[in-house]
Amino acid sequence: MLFVDCSDPQEVRAIFSWGVVCGTTTNPMLLAREGARDVEGRVRELCAASEGPLSVQVLSTEYGAMIDEARTLQAIDPNRIVVKLPFSEAGLMAARTLSKHGADVNVTACMSFQQAYLAALAGAKYVSIFWGRVRDMGYDAGAVVRDVRTMLDRESLPAQIIAGSMRQAIDVNEALLAGAHVVTVTPPILRKMLNHPKTEETLREFSEAWATRDKSR
């Protein structure tokens, strides 16, 4: 599956119009870059622009504040909001509490097998592995995703892997083939996935062949 990684409502609406993505992820960096003045207002706009699960990250780092913020976010659309929690001791505690009360949780910024495993044990519906950042550290991101997927399947844990931090279109292929349930992709990379020079050449040949056909027959 593909999600769009974006907090610009116009961009999100445009991407959803293609009919290829089924969810949305955001983070505080995207919200800041894309002009959000307040989180709740932007989340309402994103709900209107999209379909399916919408992951929204809490800004708090302390357990109690995370719970309060999560409940505020969930109230916007309880059926669609996925509470995104940072991977930390407090984040795991919050994941456990929220999941026990029926909330969908996405534990983010997982960089290793161990972190993803702990997040899954804490009750996360999604564990977000940062593919590009894992590679930046010199590790094999594909191996991390494969190992996590093997573990989830073997232990029948319901968590799904979201591979994020895609740097180029080929990363999407590799993450899906490694076993990620979901890859979340920015609009620029999604647009790169549309394009192939041979496709453009072939379609141009079709058009030219029709335009220059022998009309006398």
Image (cartoon, helix red, strand yellow):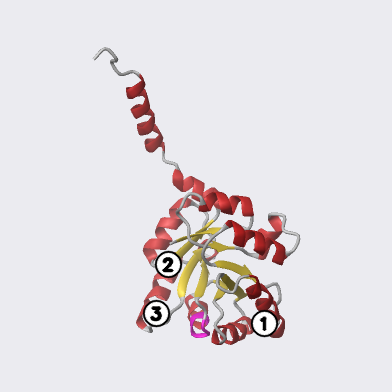
Q: Is 12 colored magenta in this rendering?
A: no
Label 3 with label 2: CB-CB less than 8 Å: no
Asked if one can make out residue 129 in the rendered structure from this viewpoint, the answer is yes
Q: Is residue 150 left or right of residue 125?
A: left
Label 1 with label 3: CB-CB less than 8 Å: no
- Dot 1, crowdedness within 10 Å: few (<14), some or many (≥20)? many
> Which residue occupies 44% across, 71% down?
144
Of 95 and 148, nearer the camera is 95
Which amino acid, mark 1?
Answer: Ile
Residue receiving disc 1: 67
Of 162 and 72, nearer the camera is 72
- Dot 3, crowdedness within 10 Å: few (<14), some or many (≥20)? some
Vertical placement of residue 72 versus 38, above or below: below
> Which residues, given as a range, are shown in magenta?
119-123
| Quadrant of the drawing holding the N terminus | bottom left
**Distance Cα–Cα, label 3 vs label 2:** 12 Å
Q: Position of residue 196 (x, y in %)?
A: 41, 40
**Distance Cα–Cα, label 1 vs label 3:** 28 Å
> Which residue occupies 53% across, 61% down?
51
Q: Is residue 135 left or right of residue 61?
A: left
Prevailing SS of the magenta stretch: helix
Q: Position of residue 146 (x, y in %)?
A: 39, 70
Residue receiving disc 2: 180
Which amino acid, mark 2?
Answer: Ala
Q: Position of residue 67 (x, y in %)?
A: 67, 82
Label 2 with label 1: CB-CB less than 8 Å: no
